[in-house]
Amino acid sequence: MRDAYIIGAGQTDFGSFPNRSYRSMFHEAFEATRESVESDVDPDDIEEAFVGMVGIGGRQIGLAGPGATSHLGLNGISTVRLENACASGGFAVRQAIQAIRSGMADLVLAGGVEMMNDMSSDAAKYWFGVSGEMEWERMAGTTFSGVFAQMASAHMEAHGTTKRHLSQIAVKSHAYGANNPHAQLGFECSLDQALTAPDVAAPLNLYHCCPMSDGAATVLIASEDVVDQYTDRPVRVAGVGASTDGIGLFERDTYTSIPASKDAAAEAYAEAGFEDPIEALDFAEVHDCFSIAELMAYEDLGFCEPGDGGEFIESGQPTPDGALPINTSGGLKSKGHPIGATGTGQVVEAFKQLTGRAGDRQIDAPKRGLCHNMGGSGGAVTVHVFERPDGEVSA
Amino acid sequence: MRDAYIIGAGQTDFGSFPNRSYRSMFHEAFEATRESVESDVDPDDIEEAFVGMVGIGGRQIGLAGPGATSHLGLNGISTVRLENACASGGFAVRQAIQAIRSGMADLVLAGGVEMMNDMSSDAAKYWFGVSGEMEWERMAGTTFSGVFAQMASAHMEAHGTTKRHLSQIAVKSHAYGANNPHAQLGFECSLDQALTAPDVAAPLNLYHCCPMSDGAATVLIASEDVVDQYTDRPVRVAGVGASTDGIGLFERDTYTSIPASKDAAAEAYAEAGFEDPIEALDFAEVHDCFSIAELMAYEDLGFCEPGDGGEFIESGQPTPDGALPINTSGGLKSKGHPIGATGTGQVVEAFKQLTGRAGDRQIDAPKRGLCHNMGGSGGAVTVHVFERPDGEVSA
């Protein structure tokens, strides 16, 4: 299989932009992506595009992929909208890599966009819940906050996880996000604030839940045959993993783990050629729609043993001074969560870290990082491992 | 690039099934597909899946891809929902072929499902129009029937196309569909009936518009490395084409042609190694959401010269005795149009024709056929060319 490389990545601010169109947001992200590539990119050289978008809130849903790329002037290519709930962006990246590997394209755009704060249509209000299991969960009154609260309660009971652990995750992510100019909630919070915020769905409070966001993020991926034309600081796709599962929580054997995360991580690690992620990785962006999701990711991705997620954050492992900085972008919690754009936004952070462009939150010369993107309550997951090519020195 | 082969394909009846779940419909199509494969297919051998679904009407939208494949027991694989409006199924087939070509999978499921007759939610009623251009067409009051009526009017004015031509297409498609046991409107109609039906959006009347349908269709695609394990009557993917365009009619230079159809056909024909489709093809399934769409497809796919679509049907070319039988399944008009499943349903017909299983509508030993699937009013198009491998004789 041919190697694939990220040659550029960029995003809009994540936040509330009710007067913007999905087209203009996607265009802004694309221009930021083009500017991040060392050489000029002729849009006519882009041969395929994959657009992650769930469609909540935004006026355009059907054909929003071609609608977005046509607005960039990319008519005549294959563009498809992908939807796997909050993992739509991660799957857009995966399919772009697959297009490169197939030999059908040498330069592919993976993007995501979501406009969640336009609630002007009846459908928009109805829409958000539709990313959960509808027939037997949502119609029984369950919400996403409720589903993750069930997981948090189960984890607390099984492993002694506490509200303090969840709050420490929020404090950590906000500290990172305060250094990300694109973050929606780019401010620090204290442990006391995170502990005492009003409940959303007990035991989860406001600081344990990510915001609703508008935003777009895009990534340009090139084959090994053309990468040298564009940059001498490429980021190599070292491992790709994807998995799916029953989309309803009730369909699974466990409430305290996401099996699809484990499967996807195993696949990505095997392809990247390592077993111990703590040893192999220098940073990770994980899917923290709720703080309990980040805590479970610590365990499911093998950063610690099952049940030890609380101890992992308590001991400061995911902080700048710990073993593995996690969600240096601020994560979904602080950076924001425009659901279709979240997965590609994570790759923007990985690209910035690996090419030395992460500003005040830059890690010292990282060589390898991971992105973990989850849909719904764990029905679909992608894990990607990215690395600087051997011998290359970060700028 | 590795060769890809269809080893099996099957579908449900297309019709109105308000009491069925999208899961059970998808499962029924999958079981029909498995039965169509000569050897047993172990579901555990399926490595990826692509599910075309727009989400209109059906209760599940977000994560409906994994929701459908999980119901088949296919947990742990990469499944993604694809949406390009009415071309969602065609793109599911394209991406499944790309997965095979990438080397990432040897056996891939491409499927589509749509439940359009469940209008129980506010969102469902809102939803159908969302596959059109929203910001500047639908919000100005345009409907799909209206958009295609504009095209029909323009074609009539430019090329002398008549309501009689459009009605002849309906008569032809219903005659074919009357021999398809899966067809939603599986009855013949007279030219007088088709000419005098009530208007939907003048000049288009009831017989110039396809129905709203529930249905599912799936296709199993194997790599050249494993195809022999499953069948000695495979159908080879000879050519793949896909293209996109502005999703609003107003964004294009022409109202009498679909540029994305031309682009996709050129790409598919080049890969399949021919220039004259009339000479190369033995049948075609084209996207006839409205009769004017089929007429324009005659021209855009190169079956006749631009503007000669009326003459093409008038002279009986797409009928059993003509140069190229078109929509032997009955097409969207008679067979039905469950939008996410339509593109995979076309491939079911191609598979049946090429393996001698098309019953009373079987063409005599066809060697090569085409499927043309269009999204919206032409914002996204796929064209696939399928053929019996050299020397093989149809059953």
Image (tube, coloured by chain):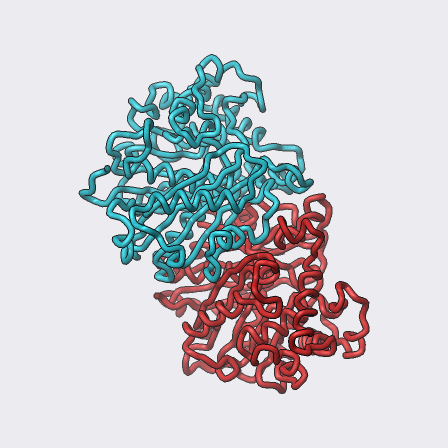
Chain colours: A cyan, B red
Residue drawn at x 57%, y 62% is: B252
Residue A393 placement (x, y as % from top left): 20, 39
B184 sits left or right of A19 in the view: right
Is B235 situated above or below A81?
below
For the point 45% across and 47% down, the residue is: A111
Specify the quadrant of the image occupied by residue A387. top left
Residue B9 in which image quadrant:
bottom right
Give x and y (percent) for residue B169: 68, 76
Residues A251 and B133: in front is B133
Where does the image place residue A163, in percent across and percent down from the top left?
Answer: 48, 18
Residue placed at 42% from the left, 57% from the top? A48
Quarter of the image that includes the N terminus of chain A = bottom left
- Seen from the viewer's position, the closer of residues B49 and B171 is B171
Q: Position of residue B134 (x, y in %)?
A: 63, 50
Where B290 falls versus A391 (above or below)? below
Q: Quadrant of the C terminus of chain A?
A: top left
In-front residue for pair B349/B144:
B144
In this view, B320 is above or below B199: below
- The residue lying furthest to the top in this view is A192
Q: Is residue B173 visible?
A: yes
A35 left or right of A62 in image = left
Task: Note whether residue B57 is visible.
Answer: no
